[in-house]
Image: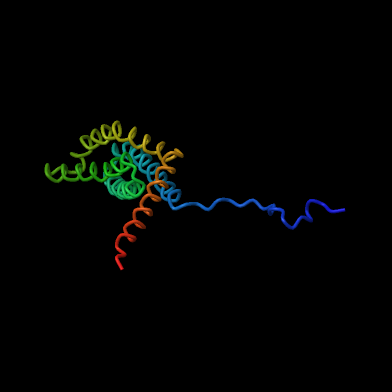
Amino acid sequence: MTTPDDNPFRAPQLSFEPAETKFERILRRLRICLGLQCAIIVFGVAAAFYSIVVTGAILSLVGILTAFFSRRSTLTYGWIFGLSGPAISSACFVLIHLLDWGPTDAQHPVSIIAAVYTTFALPLGLYAWTKTGSDNLVTELENSFDAALVADDVQHETKNTG
C-alpha cells in the first residue's frame, strides 16, 4: 500500500516566502525616514525651547533622505514633506544670521517658528506615512516599473534598423 508521501509528482511541502521586491525595500526605507522625520519634528519643537543648535542639522539630513526616497517612489507628498525639513532649517539659519541674533535672542522666535512648522508639516508627514503603507502604492510602483521596462524594450526595437 502506498501513502501520499510516496507520490513522486507531489508538490514539495515547504512553504517559501516571496522575495522582497525593490519597491518594497524603497517603501520600507521611505516609511522609516518619514517616521524618523516626524519624530524629529516633535522632539525638535520640544528641544527648541531649550536649544536650537543640533535639531536643524539632523532635520535637514533626514529630510533630504526622505525627499530622496520619496522621489524614487514617486510620492509627491513625501517629497514635499522631506524638503520642508531642510527648508525650515535653512530659513531659521538665514534669519538668525541676517538679524544678527545671539542664542538668547533667537530662542523665542525660532521656537515659535518651529511650533508653527510642526502644526503644518506634521499632518502632511503623517499623511505621507500612511500612503506608503497602502497596497495601491506598491501596485502603482510595480506598474510604472513594468511600463518603463516595456518602453525601454520598444525603444531598443526601433533603433535596430539593420
Q: Quadrant of residue 134?
A: top left
The answer to which of 64 and 10 lies nearer the viewer is 10
The answer to which of 103 and 12 lies nearer the viewer is 12
- Give the percent coordinates (x, y) of residue 91: 19, 42
Q: Residue furthest right?
A: 1
The answer to which of 42 and 122 lies nearer the viewer is 122
Q: Quadrant of residue 37?
A: top left
Residue at position x 44%, y 43% in the image: 139
Q: Is residue 18 left or right of residue 105?
A: right
Residue at position x 34%, y 42% in the image: 75
The answer to which of 143 and 110 lies nearer the viewer is 143
Q: Quadrant of residue 35?
A: top left
Residue at position x 39%, y 50% in the image: 145
What is the basis of the colouring in this image? rainbow
Q: How many marks?
A: 0
Q: Residue furthest front?
A: 162
- Give the percent coordinates (x, y) of residue 11: 69, 53
- Give the percent coordinates (x, y) of residue 24: 45, 48
Residue at position x 41%, y 36% in the image: 130
Quadrant, the C terminus = bottom left
- Give the percent coordinates (x, y) of residue 87: 23, 43
